Amino acid sequence: MSGPGQDSEPEAKVLLIKRLYRAVVESVHKLDVIIGSKASYREVFKPENISLRNKLRELCVKLMFLHPVDYGRKAEELLWRKVYYEVIQVIKTNKKHIHSRSALECAYRTHLIAGVGFYQHLLLYIQSHYQLELQDCIDWTHVTDPLIGRKKPVSATPKEMEWAQMACHRCLVYLGDLARYQNELAGVEAEQLAERFYHQALSVMPHVGMPFNQLGTLAGSKFYNVEATYYYLRCIQSEFPFEGTYGNLKRLFDKAAKMYHQVKKQEMKKLSPSRQR
């Protein structure tokens, strides 16, 4: 269970990391059972299951800050996927069971709002903890209280600082995703907010293509899919493209080809038999 960088760690810290990781794995297994059930859309918002997700979120945050190099990325991924994303997918998959203004829809809206609040807080905390200077990248950063003075910089290795920067980037992508999901709900206009988060993620890490993919997804079929195609191509041309973008782009091209052949077929029908040859 020990990570690659734990040989030189104090024994107490290593034991704590192991305990945390075991607790994370245990919580993940419990949540997997809930998500895998037939009526998962009814189960996910039960108080005990919300508490379980909150517990996992707390454990993941502790783990990522205790050992960001070895566990930070994994903890981030599990937190997003198990606490927020999989619940969202359950609701989206069971749309026919979610009626407007029902208790389930209300719980789902609350879930998205809570996610936004959490990732905004996490983004600010990472900036503050590692004293990151992102003022030129995002429009709301941590502010030093002049009465308290500047926080003493944390003693962090270059690898930890690299993780912190990437974690901020991913927080912004997650915030964009949450705003995009909110935008799909009736009565919520969050498209521009989602765009803003994705563009800020690009400002923090311009070489990572993932936000371009998300912008393509957000664009949908606007302007005959031209806008989405542009963003997918930008993603592919990035230094670190998102693998799923190739499939997204192929689907758009296949759709365009199908539309072209349909139009051509319709045009041919309008021609006289002699001109069709």
Image (spheres, rainbow, N blue to C red):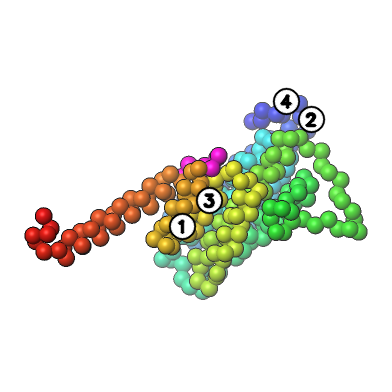
Q: Taking 70 as reference, is 58 above or below it?
A: below
Q: CA distance from mark 2 to mark 3?
A: 42 Å
Q: Nearer the viewer, mark 2 or mark 1?
A: 1
Q: Secondary structure at mark 1?
A: helix
The percent position of residue 179, horizontal first and vertical second, equals: 57, 61
15 or 270, which is in the foreground? 270
Q: Which residue corresponds to the image point at 41% horizontal and 58% vertical from the top-left? A: 225
The amino acid type found where label 2 is placed reads: Pro
Q: Which residue corresponds to the image point at 54% horizontal and 53% vertical from the top-left? A: 85
Which mark, by number, is residue 7? 4
> Which class describes the residues within 10 Å of circle 2: few (<14), some (14-19), or many (20+)?
few
Q: CA distance from mark 2 to mark 4?
A: 8 Å
In the picture of the structure, the residue carrying the numbered disc 2 is: 10
Q: Secondary structure at mark 4?
A: loop
256 or 140, which is in the foreground? 256
Q: Secondary structure at mark 2?
A: loop
Q: Image quadrant of residue 2? A: top right
Q: Nearer the viewer, mark 3 or mark 4?
A: 3
Q: Nearer the viewer, mark 2 or mark 3?
A: 3
240 inside magenta stretch: yes
Dominant secondary structure of the residues highlighted in magenta in the image? loop
Q: Looking at the image, tell me whether mark 1 or mark 4 is earlier in sequence order.
A: 4
Q: From the viewer's perspective, is 260 left or right of 107?
A: left
Q: Looking at the image, tell me whether mark 1 or mark 3 is earlier in sequence order.
A: 3
In the picture of the structure, the residue carrying the numbered disc 3 is: 212
Q: Looking at the image, tell me whether mark 2 or mark 3 is earlier in sequence order.
A: 2
> Which class describes the residues within 10 Å of circle 1: few (<14), some (14-19), or many (20+)?
some
In the picture of the structure, the residue carrying the numbered disc 1 is: 227
Q: Nearer the viewer, mark 1 or mark 4?
A: 1
> Which class describes the residues within 10 Å of circle 4: few (<14), some (14-19), or many (20+)?
few
Residue 277 visible within the image = yes
The amino acid type found where label 4 is placed reads: Asp
